Image (tube, helix red, strand yellow):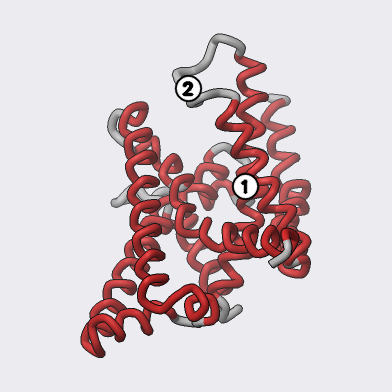
């Protein structure tokens, strides 16, 4: 295998696995509802990421030992093959049920955190129909209208009938903002100087630099290896620009002039 071929495949593999770890940025979305967030948020992020890494590593070791790398690379549904081989037909059903439970749990987590993004934007007058999407449920105090919006969009996306493609599209556009987020650490540090607002960056500036270059490598590699989906992902993201200029910019301008 050539170096170029290895680099391309490695980048695609990394992009595919990032979906398993993507929950890390959803946790801060509900930081305002976490008790002692300064302490517990860090513990949740570190312990959660370590747990996912260990589970992911052990599962892949099991895959390789049971069916081998070659069959794993060409299999559409490796988990069914492995579970049936190890535990028979009953084990295959039980593991499938376990996967469904895991998916529902993940869906629940994203449902709780994802709906708070348009809600927070609307609350800060950074969204369309701010009065609508900033409303809370009268009894449960949850962002009801924001949740309806997110659920409708989610249902529309399912009509693509390709989970793998959806995750690749999501990871590409998401990591554009992750890289910008990591760059923002340097900007925030420069603006605040020594007056940091109660946060630390472990091994600064090494940690954010590694994150920036790693994210940039993933993005560039995906552009060259899968240009169609990369362009499509960017176009979906850019749909937010006309919304911003038509609905949000004037609201921010008028608010600033008061």
Please rate how many residues cluster around mark 2, counting C-alpha atoms within 10 Å: few if below 14, some from 14 to 19, many from 20: few
**Number of disc labels:** 2
Q: Is residue 183 visible?
A: yes
User: Does residue 108 appear left or right of residue 152 in this picture?
Assistant: left
User: On screen, 178 above or below 81?
Assistant: above
Quadrant assignment for the N terminus: bottom right
Q: Residue at x 50, y 82 (%)?
A: 76
Nearest to viewer (mark 1 / mark 2): 2
Which dot marks residue 148? Answer: none
In this orientation, which residue lies closer to the viewer: 178 or 204? 204
Which is more N-terminal, label 2 or label 1? 1
Distance from label 1 to label 2 (Cα)?
30 Å
> Is label 1 in contact with label 2 (beta carbons under 8 Å)?
no
Q: Residue at x 32, y 35 (%)?
A: 43
Q: Residue at x 68, y 24 (%)?
A: 258
Q: Is residue 232 visible?
A: no
Residue closest to the far top: 194
For mark 2, give the secondary structure: loop
Q: Which residue is mark 1?
A: 127
Q: Residue at x 60, y 24 (%)?
A: 205
Residue closest to the far bottom: 89
User: Does residue 12 appear left or right of residue 141 in this picture?
Assistant: right
Q: Which residue is mark 2?
A: 200
Q: Percent position (x, y) of residue 82?
A: 35, 80
Q: Percent position (x, y) of residue 69?
A: 49, 73
């Amino acid at each position: 295998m050539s170096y170029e071929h290895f680099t391309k495949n490695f980048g695609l593999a990394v992009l595919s696995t990032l979906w398993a770890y993507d929950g890390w940025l959803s946790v801060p979305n509900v930081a305002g509802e976490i008790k002692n967030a300064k302490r517990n948020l860090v513990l949740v992020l570190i312990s959660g990421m370590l747990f996912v890494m260990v589970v992911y590593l052990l599962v892949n070791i099991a895959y390789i030992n049971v069916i081998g790398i070659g069959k794993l690379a060409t299999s559409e549904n490796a988990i069914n093959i492995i579970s049936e081989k190890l535990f028979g037909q009953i084990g295959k059903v039980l593991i499938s049920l376990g996967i469904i439970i895991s998916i529902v749990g993940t869906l629940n987590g994203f449902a709780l955190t994802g709906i708070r993004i348009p809600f927070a934007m609307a609350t800060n007058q950074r969204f369309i129909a701010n009065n609508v999407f900033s409303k809370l449920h009268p009894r449960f105090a949850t962002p009801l209208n924001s949740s309806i919006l997110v659920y409708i969009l989610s249902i529309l996306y399912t009509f693509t009938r390709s989970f793998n493609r959806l995750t690749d599209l999501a990871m590409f556009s998401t990591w554009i903002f992750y890289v910008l987020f990591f760059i923002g650490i340097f900007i925030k540090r420069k603006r605040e100087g020594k007056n940091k607002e109660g946060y630390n960056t472990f091994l600064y500036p090494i940690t954010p630099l590694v994150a920036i270059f790693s994210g940039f490598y993933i993005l560039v590699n995906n552009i060259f290896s899968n240009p169609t989906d990369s362009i499509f992902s960017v176009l979906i993201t850019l749909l937010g620009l006309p919304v911003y200029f038509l609905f949000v910019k004037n609201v921010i301008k008028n608010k600033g002039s008061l």
